[in-house]
Amino acid sequence: MVNILDKESFKKELEGKTEYRVDFEDSDDIVNSLKTIYDVENELEPIPNITINLKNVSKENLIAALKYSLEREDLVNSTMILNILNLIKVYNTLDDSFFANEYVYFKNLTELLDVKLALTNELTTFITNLSIWYISIIKSMHKVEYSYLDNTVKLPKVYARIILTSDFLTLSGIFSRAKPFSTGDLKLVENAYGYMVSLTNKSAVASKFLDLLDDAYEQRKASVWVYPLG
């Protein structure tokens, strides 16, 4: 495998590729390797889909990797964001298939809980920051044209990825775990209306799907004959 710590060699290795996988072992310099991966993902266009596999590293190294990743507001790596979401979501199906998934870093429920406990402060900070940006979108969505007086800010990449891949129910659960903050902490977010449209569309699709299931259930009930006894 190419030396990931050598940024230029790693960029050359990715040339022409749309998919790439990095399997880490405890002997690797994981945090510095992650730094290179994340830096390269922010420099390349288009961004290749780099799968980061931390399934086989020790709990200590996994904690270090997640702690570093939670500090990167420019994080765009899909597998790392997936595992961060697994740590901050309220609802998870924690059955055997969940932990058997090759993209899930945690080997079992005990390890997941140990990691969450070790990263309590970092996760609380991340959840609070995500919640501030989420509520900022709601505050900013009315603003579709800007003047030179508007102090607009771009939504950091990691929060944009999470919001665009989540729904209102998921974000509400995450928001419920945030530390209290003031409306004075809210930002004027660029393209806030676009983010809200994306969230609304996903909710509409989910609602339509549930309606179809409900209609199918009612039709099935109506087609069942009930014979009286006797």
Image (cartoon, helix red, strand yellow):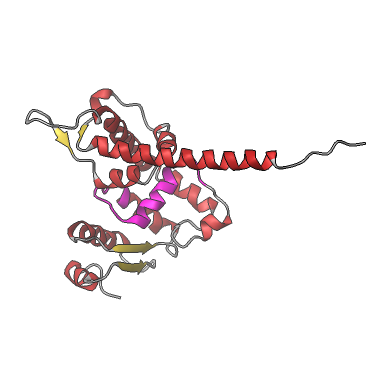
Is 230 displayed left or right of 63 in the figure?
Answer: right
Q: Which residue lies at the image location 28% right of the left edge and 44% below the top edge?
A: 160
Q: Which residue lies at the image location 39% right of the left edge and 33% below the top edge?
A: 175
Q: Is residue 73 visible?
A: no
Up the image or down, 13 lies above or below 89; here it is below
- Near-viewer residue (193 or 54): 193
- Residue 215 quadrant: top right
What quarter of the picture does the C terminus occupy? top right
Q: Which residue lies at the image location 26% right of the left edge and 49% below the top edge?
A: 72
* Residue 49 located within the stretch drawn in magenta: no
User: Range of the magenta residues?
Assistant: 69-92
- Near-viewer residue (81 or 24): 81
Q: Position of residue 143 (x, y in %)?
A: 20, 29
Q: Is residue 17 visible?
A: yes
Q: Position of residue 21 (x, y in %)?
A: 35, 68
Residue extending farthest to the left is 148
- Near-viewer residue (21 or 206): 206
- Residue 169 quadrant: top left
Q: Which residue lies at the image location 41% right of the left edge and 52% below the top edge?
A: 83
What quarter of the picture does the N terminus occupy? bottom left
Q: Position of residue 75 (x, y in %)?
A: 27, 51
Q: Position of residue 11 (x, y in %)?
A: 20, 68
Residue extending farthest to the bottom is 1
- Residue 56 quadrant: bottom left
Q: How many marks?
A: 0
Residue extending farthest to the top is 183
Up the image or down, 207 lies above or below 114; here it is above
Up the image or down, 86 lies above or below 15; here it is above
* Residue 70 located within the stretch drawn in magenta: yes
